Image (cartoon, rainbow, N blue to C red):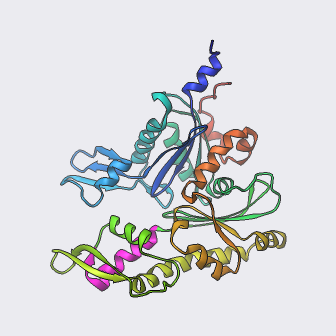
C-alpha cells in the first residue's frame, strides 16, 4: 500500500521556472524540461481579455486578428505588466503540472542579479498566485553556472556569461556563491531590433519579428563570413508604398549590424574581467569562460569572444536550458537551496509550509 507521503510525492511537483523576456522554460524534478514557450500573451483590445498564451500567442505575432494585439509582459528580464505576467505564469504552471494536480510543493525561480526589491516582489507574488506552495528565488548567473556543470563545492572560480534575449548576465562563481556579477539590460533581441532598423532605413523594407529572428538564427554570424556576397531574399512591406515587397540582403551587409551588438557584449565581458581579485583572475585565465543562454547559439559568438578577450570560450550543452537545469538541481540539495536563495523573509512569511516527505 502507498504511504501518504508517497502519494503526496505523486501529486506534487518541485518546479524550476526560468521566466525570461523571450521564453518561459519550466523543468520538473525527475521529468526534465516540460515547457518551453514564448513569454507572450495575445490580448483582445476591445475587452482587455487575454485570448492566448505562449506558443499560441507567438503563432499570432505579426498576423494578429483585427482587435488582437500580442504583448510581452516581461521587459528586460523583469515584470513590465504585473497582471498579465501573473496570468501567463499561472497558465504555464498549470500546463506544466503532472496529472492535472493543483498543488505544487515548491518552485525555484531565477532572477537577474541587479533586480530591485520591488521587481523581485512582483516575480514572487506572480509565482505565489500560481498555486505554488513555497517559492525560492536565486540569481540567474548562479543557476546557469550549476546548469553548465560548475560544482557548488568547487573552490576555484568559473566565469559564466548568460546571454538572454534582453539581458546579458556575467557571473563569477566560486564555492557555490557569486563572487562578482554584472548585469546589462541588452541581449540577443538587440540584434533583431538592429536588423529591422537597418532594413527599414537603408532598404526601405518593414519586416516583422519572425523575419528578423529567422535572419539572426540562420543567416547572421558573429564573425566575418568567408563569402560576403552570399545573399538571401527578405520579404516584408515597402516603407514608401505600403505594398508587399522583397529585397536581397548579403552576409556582408548583415555582419557589421550583428558585430556592433556582439562587440557591446564582448566589451562588457572584458571590462568585468578587469574587476576581479588576483586569485579569481588566475582561475579564469586557466579555465576561460562558459557561454549560456539563447544568445550563445548565435553562429560564431564563441569564436568572436575568444579573439576579443584572449581566453578559452566554450558554449555549454543546451545553453538555453542551462539556467533551468541549474535551478532544478537545487532540489537535490535543500541546504544549498536555502543558502543560495535570495528571499526576503517578510515576503515569504505568508508562504505555505511545504509538506514533509
Count the numbered circles shown: 0
Residue drawn where x is 59% and y is 23% of the image: 8
Whether 110 is drawn above or below 298: the answer is above
Whole-percent x and y of residue 318? 57, 57
Whether 175 is drawn above or below 94: the answer is below
Q: Tell me, yes or no, whether the highlighted magenta stretch contains residue 139.
A: no
Left of 334 or right of it: where is 262?
left
Q: Tell me, yes or no, whether the highlighted magenta stretch contains residue 191.
A: yes
Q: Nearer the viewer, residue 158 or 352?
A: 158
Q: Nearer the viewer, residue 300 or 51?
A: 300
Residue 173 in view in this figure: yes
Residue drawn where x is 53% and y is 77% of the image: 262
Whole-percent x and y of residue 351? 59, 33
Whole-percent x and y of residue 250? 37, 84
Q: Nearer the viewer, residue 327 or 354?
A: 327
The furthest residue to the top: 1
Location of the C terminus by quadrant is top right
Left of 334 or right of it: where is 61?
left
Q: Nearer the viewer, residue 126 or 143?
A: 143
Image: magenta residue range: 189-206
Location of the N terminus by quadrant is top right
Residue 186 in view in this figure: no
Residue drawn where x is 66% and y is 57% of the image: 148
Whether 354 is drawn above or below 110: the answer is above
Left of 105 or right of it: where is 85?
left
Quadrant of residue 263 within the rendered picture? bottom right
Q: Main secondary structure of the magenta part?
A: helix
Whole-percent x and y of residue 172? 72, 64
Quadrant of residue 309 within the rendered picture? bottom right
Amino acid at each position: 500500500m502507498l504511504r501518504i507521503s508517497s502519494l503526496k510525492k505523486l501529486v506534487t511537483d518541485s518546479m524550476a521556472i526560468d521566466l525570461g523576456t523571450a521564453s518561459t522554460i519550466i523543468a520538473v524534478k525527475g521529468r526534465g524540461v516540460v515547457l518551453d514557450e514564448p513569454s507572450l500573451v495575445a490580448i483582445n483590445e476591445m475587452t482587455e481579455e487575454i485570448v492566448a498564451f505562449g506558443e499560441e500567442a507567438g503563432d499570432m505575432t505579426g498576423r494578429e486578428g483585427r482587435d488582437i494585439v500580442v504583448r510581452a509582459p516581461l521587459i528586460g528580464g523583469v515584470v513590465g505588466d504585473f497582471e498579465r505576467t501573473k496570468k501567463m505564469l499561472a497558465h504555464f504552471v498549470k500546463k506544466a503540472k503532472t496529472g492535472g494536480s493543483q498543488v505544487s510543493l515548491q518552485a525555484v525561480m531565477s532572477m537577474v542579479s541587479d533586480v530591485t526589491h520591488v521587481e523581485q516582489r512582483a516575480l514572487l507574488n506572480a509565482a505565489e498566485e500560481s498555486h505554488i506552495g513555497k517559492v525560492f528565488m536565486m540569481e540567474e548567473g548562479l543557476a546557469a553556472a550549476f546548469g553548465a556543470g560548475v560544482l557548488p563545492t568547487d573552490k576555484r572560480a568559473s566565469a559564466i556569461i548568460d546571454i538572454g534575449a534582453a539581458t546579458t548576465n556575467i557571473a563569477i562563481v566560486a564555492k557555490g556563491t557569486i563572487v562578482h556579477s554584472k548585469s546589462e539590460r541588452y541581449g540577443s533581441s538587440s540584434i533583431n531590433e538592429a536588423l529591422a532598423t537597418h532594413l527599414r532605413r537603408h532598404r526601405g523594407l518593414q519586416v516583422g519579428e519572425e523575419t528578423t529572428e529567422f535572419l539572426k538564427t540562420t543567416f547572421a554570424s558573429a564573425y566575418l563570413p568567408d563569402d560576403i556576397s552570399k545573399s538571401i531574399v527578405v520579404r516584408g512591406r515597402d516603407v514608401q508604398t505600403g505594398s508587399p515587397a522583397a529585397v536581397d540582403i548579403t552576409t556582408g551587409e548583415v555582419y557589421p549590424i550583428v558585430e556592433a551588438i556582439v562587440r557591446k557584449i564582448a566589451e562588457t565581458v572584458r571590462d568585468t574581467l578587469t574587476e576581479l581579485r588576483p586569485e579569481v583572475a588566475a582561475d579564469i585565465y586557466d579555465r576561460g569562460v562558459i557561454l549560456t543562454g539563447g544568445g550563445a547559439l548565435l553562429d560564431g559568438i564563441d569564436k568572436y569572444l575568444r579573439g576579443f578577450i584572449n581566453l578559452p570560450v566554450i558554449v555549454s550543452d543546451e545553453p538555453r536550458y542551462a539556467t533551468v537545469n541549474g535551478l532544478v538541481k537545487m532540489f537535490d540539495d535543500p541546504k544549498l537551496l536555502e543558502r543560495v536563495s535570495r528571499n526576503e523573509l517578510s515576503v515569504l512569511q505568508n508562504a505555505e509550509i511545504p509538506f514533509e516527505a
